[in-house]
């Protein structure tokens, strides 16, 4: 067989233990044809073969993003971005410019508004001064708070308050009207609904399907948003991703895009099981697993949330938060969760649970232990705090630690203030562990949780390599090769995709990323600024950053 494309004169890091390093890779038919020396591989060039001289750049397996939210992230890309914006004048300028560019949008929605964007807590009065004649709203970076102006609150029916489930709050002022601050999804979803695309949030919100089923016109609009998300990910070298929310509609959109030749990454989508659901609803998870099992769109796992997040103290802890008598609460009852894990495992499906507090982590491990199916590679997402007694249980039970190098406060974009407010000083040594988990046998998969943080894998690699140990705590960094493994082969294994992608070896899918430099020579603190020269998914160039 002749090569269709050869990348040569590269520093190839294959992530394949049998042959960790090479100089060139040949591709044909969407697969890797050969990995080897320049002479070996260049000999496979036939007529019409595209030969790329990598100029000594590092060639890796395409990045596997183990935890992101593609549809939400893609949707947000077209909204106003407020990262780095501070003070009323900047905020007003940004919103007014966005309003001019988008005269017809029913809601002007912004992302990435820092909690301290104004010197005081934001109110609807502030936002009315920004823009008083059209509905506007802005979301915090952690996606747990929205601030809205008066026209938006009125249009959403929230101006005079609304009954909400526990933990979801329309904050009310002394005058009996809403202040504009909306805490958690149920409280702000009526505002988001003004955009007309709330059905895109169902995968994370309810796990349900859109009703009525979106028309071809609506699906075309939705696919444009997914396409924007995919292009953004391709520019960061991502060729596979595990979407951490979902429903059948997400899979259908992706499968239509695959048929249209527009799907530029392999996407795994879960069934989202919510606490109120009966066990019988897992039949829908089995149906999704049976329907979507291709190389590009696949399901086969169930996502659950065991708790919330540390900043709002909704993460479930074994001990009270500092200076409080609260420790959060699990979203699933302990024994019922074990039954759910047994049922999902009996269906041969994998489980991924968001567990942030040490109480949530323990209860999740207990459920996996009860299920007794290490072959299914059940995984825990985040693990921001863990009790020392639970550390060895991950490896022993075959549980993957799906953690995010950008997340530890101080490591990338999140402020250190979180550490002071939510973790007891003596527990800092148990927070955001990576090296300790892997030294005790846990498999590692790395990710960004985009759009919660920047999807840039290079920035994530930098964060993983440069993270400073917390005062008096052990160094939780792992070496470069371990970091790269967790962003490639480790992620593929954790997603049951190791027979398809994650290493560069003949016969595997032609999923590759060419870094714009020699990753072993670039100082770690410069890696985040290093670009992606080329991304190839299934043999197709999905990003060409260096015009090679
Ligand atoms: Zn997430």
Image: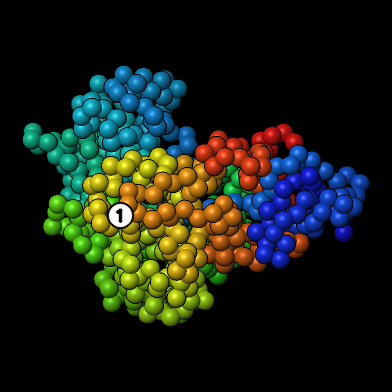
Q: Position of residue 91 (x, y in %)?
A: 33, 24
Q: Is residue 218 left or right of residue 413?
A: right
Q: Position of residue 449 (x, y in %)?
A: 44, 50
Helix, strand or loop at disc 1? helix
Q: Which residue is found at the position 71% from the left and 66% from the top?
A: 18
Density class for disc 1 (Cα within 10 Å; few <14, some 14-19, many ≥20) is many
Residue position marked by numbered label 1 in the rendering:
428
Q: Position of residue 258 (x, y in %)?
A: 63, 52
Quick check: 538 above or below 173? below
Q: Quadrant of residue 326?
A: bottom left
Viewer-proximal residue among 448 and 242 = 448
Viewer-proximal residue among 121 and 124 = 121
Quick check: 13 above or below 97? below
Tell me the quarter of the image containing the N terminus: bottom right
Q: Quadrant of residue 275?
A: bottom left
Q: Quadrant of residue 220?
A: top right
């Amino acid at each position: 067989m002749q090569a269709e494309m050869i990348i040569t004169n590269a520093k190839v890091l294959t992530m394949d233990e049998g042959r960790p390093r090479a100089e060139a890779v040949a591709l044909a038919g969407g697969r890797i044809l050969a990995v080897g020396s320049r002479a070996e591989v260049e000999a496979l060039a036939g007529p019409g073969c595209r030969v790329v001289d990598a100029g000594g750049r590092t060639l890796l397996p395409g990045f596997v993003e183990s935890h992101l939210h593609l549809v939400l992230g893609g949707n947000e890309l077209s909204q106003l971005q407020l990262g780095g914006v501070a003070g009323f004048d900047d905020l007003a300028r940004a919103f007014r410019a966005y309003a001019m560019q988008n005269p017809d949008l029913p809601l002007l929605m912004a992302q990435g508004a820092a909690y301290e964007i104004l010197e005081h807590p934001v109110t609807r009065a502030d936002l009315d001064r920004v823009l008083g004649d059209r509905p506007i709203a802005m979301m915090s970076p952690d996606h747990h708070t929205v601030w809205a102006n008066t026209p938006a609150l009125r249009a959403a029916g929230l101006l005079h308050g609304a009954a909400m489930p526990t933990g979801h709050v329309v904050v009310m002022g002394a005058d009996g009207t809403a202040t504009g601050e909306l805490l958690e999804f149920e409280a702000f979803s009526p505002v988001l609904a003004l955009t007309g695309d709330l059905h895109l949030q169902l995968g994370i919100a309810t796990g349900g399907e859109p009703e009525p089923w979106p028309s071809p016109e609506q699906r075309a609009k939705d696919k444009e948003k997914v396409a924007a998300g995919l292009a953004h990910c391709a520019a960061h070298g991502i060729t596979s991703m595990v979407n951490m929310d979902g429903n059948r509609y997400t899979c259908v959109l992706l499968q239509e895009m695959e048929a249209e030749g527009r799907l530029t990454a392999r996407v795994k989508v879960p069934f989202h099981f919510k606490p109120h659901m009966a066990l019988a609803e897992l039949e829908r998870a089995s149906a999704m697993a049976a329907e979507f099992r291709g190389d590009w769109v696949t399901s086969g796992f169930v996502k659950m949330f065991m708790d919330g997040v540390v900043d709002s103290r909704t993460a479930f802890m074994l001990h009270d938060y500092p200076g409080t008598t609260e420790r959060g609460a699990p979203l699933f009852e302990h024994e019922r969760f074990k039954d759910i894990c047994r049922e999902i495992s009996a269906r041969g499906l994998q489980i991924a649970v968001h567990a942030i507090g040490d109480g949530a982590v323990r209860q999740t491990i207990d459920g996996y232990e009860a299920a007794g199916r290490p072959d299914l590679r059940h995984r825990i997402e985040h693990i921001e705090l863990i009790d020392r007694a639970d550390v060895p249980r991950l490896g022993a039970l075959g549980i993957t630690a799906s953690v995010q190098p950008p997340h530890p406060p101080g490591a990338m974009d999140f402020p250190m203030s979180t550490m002071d407010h939510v973790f007891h000083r003596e527990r800092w040594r148990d927070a955001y562990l990576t090296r300790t988990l892997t030294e005790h046998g846990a498999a590692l998969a790395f990710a960004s949780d985009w759009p919660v943080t920047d999807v840039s894998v290079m920035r994530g690699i930098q964060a993983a390599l440069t993270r400073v140990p917390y005062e008096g705590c052990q160094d939780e960094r792992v070496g470069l090769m371990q970091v790269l493994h967790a962003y490639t082969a480790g992620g593929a294994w954790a997603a049951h995709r190791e027979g398809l992608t994650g290493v560069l070896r003949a016969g595997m899918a032609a999923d590759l990323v060419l870094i714009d430099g020699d990753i072993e020579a670039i100082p770690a603190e410069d890696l985040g600024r290093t670009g992606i020269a080329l991304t190839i998914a299934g043999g197709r160039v999905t990003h060409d950053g260096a015009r090679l």
